[in-house]
Image (tube, helix red, strand yellow):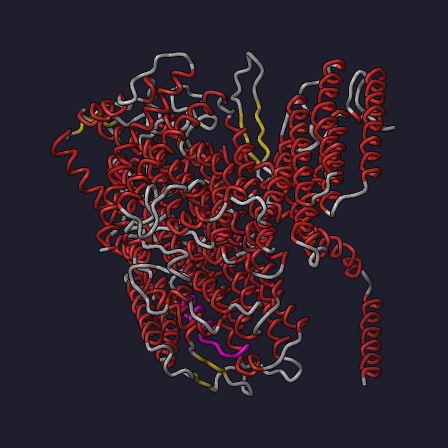
Amino acid sequence: MLGFVLWGVLAEGLFGVVAVAGRRVTSIGTVIYGGCLAVSLSVALTAVLFLVQGGAPANDALILPIGLPWLHAHFRLDVLSAFFLFVVGLGGAAVSLFALGHSRHPNKHYPDPTRILPFYPLFLAAMTLVLVADDAFVFLFSWEFMSLSSWLLVLANHREKGNADAAFIYLVMAGIGTVALLFAFGLLAGVEGHYAFSAMRGAPHTVALATAVLLLALIGAGGKAGIVPLHIWLPLAHPSAPSWVSALMSGVMTKVAVYGFIRLTFDLVGPGQWWWGGLVMAIGGVTAVMGVLKALMQHDLKRLLAYHTVENIGIIFIALGLALAFGANHRPALAALALTAALLHVFNHSVFKSLLFIGSGAVLWATGNRNMERQGGLIHRMPGTALAFLLGSAAISALPPLNGFVSEWLLLQGLLFGPQLPQWPMKMEIPIVAAMLALSAALAATCFVKAFGIVFLGRPRTPEAAQAPETDRYSLTAMFFLAGLCVLVGILPAPILDLIEPAVRLLSGETMAGAEGTNWLWLVPVDAARSSYSGLAMLVLTALAAVTLSLLIRRYLSHGVRRSAAWDCGFPDDSPSSQYTASSFAQPIRRVFGTALLAAREEVTMPEPGDTSPARFEVRLTDYAWNWFYRPPGRLVLSLAEWTSVMQRQSIRRYLGFMFATLIILLMVGMSWN
Amino acid sequence: MEFSDPKVQLQIAYLLGGSMVVVNFALLYQSRMSSVINAFAIHATILGLAVAWQANVQNAPNLYITAAIALVFKALALPAALHYVVRKLNVHRTVEMVFGTGLTMMAGVALVGLAVMIMQPVTQHSGALVTIDLIFAMAVLFLGVLMMITRRNAVTQVIGFMAMENGLILAAVGVHGMPLVVEISVALAVLVAFIVFGLFLFRIRERFYSLDVRYLDPDSRIPQ
Amino acid sequence: MELITEGLIQIAQTALVLALAPGLTGLVRWVKARLLRRRGTPILQVYSDFARLLRKKVVVAHNASWLFRLVPYLVFNAVWTAASLVPTFSTQLLFAPAADLIALIALLSSARFGLALGALDIGTSFGGLGASREMMIASLAEPAMLMIVFTVSLFAGTTHLPAVAEYMSQHQAFLQVSVLLAAIAMVIVSLAETARIPVDNPATHLELTMVHEAMVLEYSGRHLALIEAAGSLKLVLYLSLFCCLFVPWGIAHQAATPLDILAGLGIWVIKLAVGAVLLAVLETCLAKMRLFRLADLLGGGFLFGLLSVILMFVFGSL
């Protein structure tokens, strides 16, 4: 099966070449995206087959004589990578289908396809390759390849203002991340340099070394996923790429980063310290709350979604931290519960985030604008997109009976067991983290009421929005496929939990107690007497009641609708600008949290009486991450550069002297070393 | 419900001590001077009840005297005197806070958490009653100090001080009582302190026409 | 046999919460009027109001979408489902395992999500105002609610509501200071969630003060009836939830005789009536808070909840 996956990677690599060769052919987009769709689907199916067999050929490993001449490349497919392959394949397939539809109807808002087509399949191939890598070399190589190909895709729209900056920041942050991962693998490999994962896994590690690896993994993999304060590149880079690439980056690539973190900390390092869990949970909690608060303040639809990715990554890291804490305290069953929540949220987020990003792509295609303040009333013009986007919004807001709720519910159940940990700091931390989780879920709901309400509901704010055409059938199919998954996994999570179970067992040695003898209707995390949930029962009850009720009322009491002007307390205003806007919707939240957490400053300029200039209202938001973590080193580098620039203004004689001195010093160091 | 059941006894002690902490939060939350004084009266009343309950549980009649002192002096006399002072001085009815309510309350909860984490290991080998009692006493103490720190008005600082002192008494009775002499002397000391504070208040009032303690800073920059 | 009993109780409860909801709202209104020395409308007036609204034709704005017309059904049925899952007079509910306390709260959030979207659909300024404020209040109330869940779960070891009710009635929960604190937090959260004074004023149409009413301004006829009924049901739900968590005495347990169930029913109705009177008194004594003071109130609720969790740790570790 591994061979099949590798053939898929190779095929995607070939698509890249084909895209360059056939750039003059008009239907090349259809070929490339169609090919990617087929490969991604088959990779996902392979992964499912592998998981259903319970990872039967446990050592599905290959050693290929490629790469550096004296180093062979190791590949392996285990249940963990199979689960993530499933996520990547599924997301890749849906997104490719959307891209297929859009490549057939290009419009003027779209970048030159020759800037996207060659890199898109390479990006998919790199993500797949990261998941099957079984040594540090292949892992880092494909990791870096993934960063670079996505960087090129971010640059596709390079003429648009801000995109080049976004791409630059992305490249720098990706570089820092890779260096951190390089060090992490270096530490794990030890002095002998065992670069294969199997060797690292068995080797004993001291606590200090393991802790260093954890921190480096947080910087490398966590930064790629978007944890605070390493998230700054994400809301810049993700929205700058074409919408389907944004969907891949947010929905899928961040999951590959989560995979990297899990592989390093849970698999290669082995059992950890309890306070690791505390650290990771704290970072996750802060990430979740800050991500959603920043998202609420955006009025660029795609940037809003990108900040939500930060929030969801925070939720995943809370779950991973909880699993680490339970694992370190020898509570494998509870660690399994937390891990199940984490992996289920990985799957869920990839589904609804891809859905929302391609939905925003459809809006962008239809109206040519990402700014929410210039949309409105799209539900009338784009009913299909609106329905799919609505389902995705409800899912990401963790509302039952959709899938986002299932994973957050499982995580909350895990957190409710948190006080059983013996360490007092953990006992104190866990309720606070849980409150952060609840707050971020509630704020996410607020944010998506805003996103959906301002873009799709109300009255159109611009002529473009009033004339927006519905998107094409391929794109709609992709959206409804993902929206269907949101509903299906929400009401019947059991099949997905079965796919997660082998990976959880691999990492924690146990399985979620309720998953055994799975009852497909009830979701029971630990014990039926403690808590249970059934989205299906809820949905059936509510829907049955709704249908009967509406039929009864319409049959016996009243039916029919009279259309009239809006009431609005008697003073309806014709101008669409009298509606609430995205920023006015967020104003109460900004007022409550803004000054403390976002450093929001509001400035009102009122002209003097008699002055005819307009009154102005300005809101300025600062990201503390920039002020605290990036400005100081930036200033340091600048002053250092200033200082060393003295060296660039010397005579040739002096330069010769410097070089000679360096040589002498090196020789002396070499001498004393021996 | 059986009052001689040790578990129930424990729960009632716990309830009274916990209520003191809660009233302490009410003290932090109030924004009007008279409500702060009333909340303090409730604080002292609960202290009296807690001490009386301990007297009952520990069979220590001398504690009843402590309880009576708390009820008479702190719950009735002191608040009445404070109301008189506030009326007489005609100080602002609103309490001036250094930080916002939310921040102060959050700091308060953090301090309670800290109290738990400090006392839990220390008292591991003593009985449950002692542990709970000391945790609450510590929390009350911390919150009293917090109140003194976060208020600008001298009257509220006095109340913060008194609340802190209530915490001390709570701690003392929990560990099987302290000698009556000590208790009475503490009570007297508080009384003296109150008189001193009162005089002090009148004095700053005369001098600065305000009770804002910032005026006492040598480098105060408040326009007079 | 047990299945049949549970099914019958479930049906009875589902019907009863709906039947009692308007009466409860009427009772609160009547007591409030009496406290203000007005005569007040008869308690049963609310029923005829609903009947009248249901028979009226719906007037919908020109640009309303399908979502606007779907929302009332969605909101009403989500709240109704939630209300039928709270143990009120008996813990034997057939569908109780479908949702624990967390899922129940989340189901109400779904209803709120729908309502806020319905408010934005017409594109009037009042709709946006209401939706934006409602979502802010909900965001602040949610962490406080979770702290209550934490306390309950730490104390009773479960979030399955029938099990919580049974545990709470067998242990002297009211003696626990942290349970008391959680109850205070629950009162604050309930006032916010049911849109009562001091958070929202159900009897006003004043721009500065209204939250919930601003959202439903555009609804009329049967749609309005459903939304108002959902509001009444929410009141029943939160009162019942409060009773179930903190004063579950008299609730019929597993293996209860029919007589016990009848007694439980009577006690539940009495509890609801007492709760309604207390609510009316509370609303009469308090003034509506300024919108941005709510952050202090709900933040206070959250801190009480957090304090109760911390104190629960202390107790639990003994």
Instruction: Judge by depth and name the residue closer to the eye, A46 or A627.
Output: A46
State whether residue A276 is above or below residue B68.
Answer: below
The answer to if B104 sits in the magenta stretch is no
Tell me residue A658's x, y (percent): 82, 70
Numbered-mark total? 0
Using the image as rendered, state which of residue C279 and residue B130 is in the foreground: B130
- Mark yes or no: residue B149 visible: no
Q: Residue furthest right?
A: B218
> What residue sits 42% from the left and 16% below the top?
C35
Q: Reply above or below: C275 against A269.
A: above
**Over which residues does the magenta segment extend?**
A123-136
Quadrant in which residue A191 is drawn: bottom right
Whether residue C22 is situated above or below residue A306 in the rendered picture: above
Can you name the residue that lies furthest to the left here? A555
Frontmost residue, A153 versus A300: A300
Q: Is the magenta stretch mostly helix, strand or loop?
A: helix
Left or right: residue A298 compared with residue B125 = left
Q: In this view, does A533 lie above or below C65?
A: below
Q: Position of residue A469 (x, y in %)?
A: 27, 43
The percent coordinates of residue A638 (x first, y second) are 72, 53
Name the quadrant of the C terminus of chain B. Answer: top right
Q: Along the horizontal axis of the image, is C36 left or right of C176?
A: left
Q: Position of residue A219 (x, y in %)?
A: 60, 62
| Residue C220 visible in the displayed image | yes
C28 relative to B123 in the view: left or right: left
Residue A456 appears left or right of A664: left
